Image (spheres, rainbow, N blue to C red):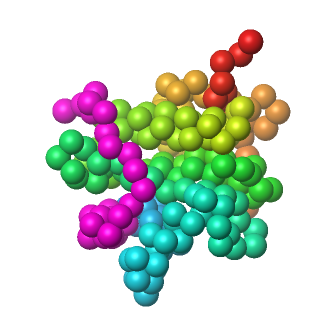
């Protein structure tokens, strides 16, 4: 089954709580936080408020940037993935996070979900005035590399690979968000 049909990509709502928490628990097995910064001690409504406020540029903690979290649902309403959009970069994101971060639940991988999430996020940052989006991924994550390249990603000419202190490495890609003149 391929997701050639358009996914519904939107901010999380009250009705999404259980699906989102289940996705978060599932993705922890891949060492991936489906719900960035969420803890079980935070009321769901408070989390939704924080994420939506961040998109508007409100209540941003020191050292953070304006950002948003969007979830992707198939036509049956099942949660299949999510994408984080950072509308600007700080020093840390310039090295290891980039403008866009996405995750797809294991049972929905290799079906085009990540490409749709990435394309959606590229439109978001373009609309916010970002002319080139930075995306990073683990150097061993072939699926993510393929997604980034399908969306127009080109390895950073100056710093294509960043080594971390724990021995892992990340690849840095740039994707133009506007057509070149």
Depicted 37 relative to depicted 92: above or below: below
Does residue 83 appear left or right of residue 20 in this picture? right
**Between 97 and 178, which is closer to the camera in this rendering?**
178
Does residue 128 appear left or right of residue 74 in this picture? right
Q: Locate residue 2: give its quadrant.
A: top left
Q: Residue at 72% across / 50% down in the picture?
A: 88
Magenta span has 5?
Answer: yes
Does residue 89 appear left or right of residue 16 in this picture? right
Depicted 30 relative to depicted 124: above or below: below
> Residue 168, image x and y in percent?
63, 53
Q: Residue at 60% across / 63% down in the picture?
A: 54
**Between 181 and 158, which is closer to the camera in this rendering?**
181
Quadrant location, the N terminus: top left
> Residue 180, image x and y in percent?
71, 16
Does residue 30 appear left or right of residue 66 in this picture? left
Magenta span has 96?
Answer: no
Tell me if I can see residue 71 in this picture: yes
Q: Residue at 26% across / 30% down in the picture?
A: 5
Magenta range: 1-26
Depicted 126 relative to depicted 29: above or below: above
> Residue 49, image x and y in percent?
49, 71
> Residue 153, image x and y in percent?
61, 28
Q: Residue furthest bottom?
A: 41
Tell me if I can see residue 164 in this picture: no
Number of marks in the rendered image: 0
Quadrant location, the C terminus: top right
């Amino acid at each position: 089954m391929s997701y050639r049909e358009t996914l519904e990509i939107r901010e999380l709502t009250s009705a999404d709580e259980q699906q989102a928490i289940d996705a978060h628990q599932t993705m922890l097995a891949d060492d991936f936080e489906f719900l960035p910064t969420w803890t079980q001690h935070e009321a769901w409504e408070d989390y939704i408020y924080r994420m939506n406020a961040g998109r508007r540029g409100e209540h941003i903690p020191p050292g953070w940037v304006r950002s948003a979290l969007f979830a992707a649902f198939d036509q049956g309403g099942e949660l299949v993935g999510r994408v984080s959009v950072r509308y600007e970069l700080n020093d840390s994101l310039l090295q290891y996070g980039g403008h866009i971060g996405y995750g797809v639940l294991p049972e929905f991988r290799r079906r085009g979900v990540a490409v749709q999430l990435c394309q959606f996020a590229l439109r978001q940052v373009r609309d916010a005035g970002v002319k080139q989006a930075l995306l990073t991924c683990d150097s061993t994550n072939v699926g993510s590399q393929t997604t980034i390249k399908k969306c127009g990603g080109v390895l950073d000419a100056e710093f294509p690979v960043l080594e971390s202190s724990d021995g892992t490495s990340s690849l840095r890609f740039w994707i133009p968000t506007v057509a070149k003149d």
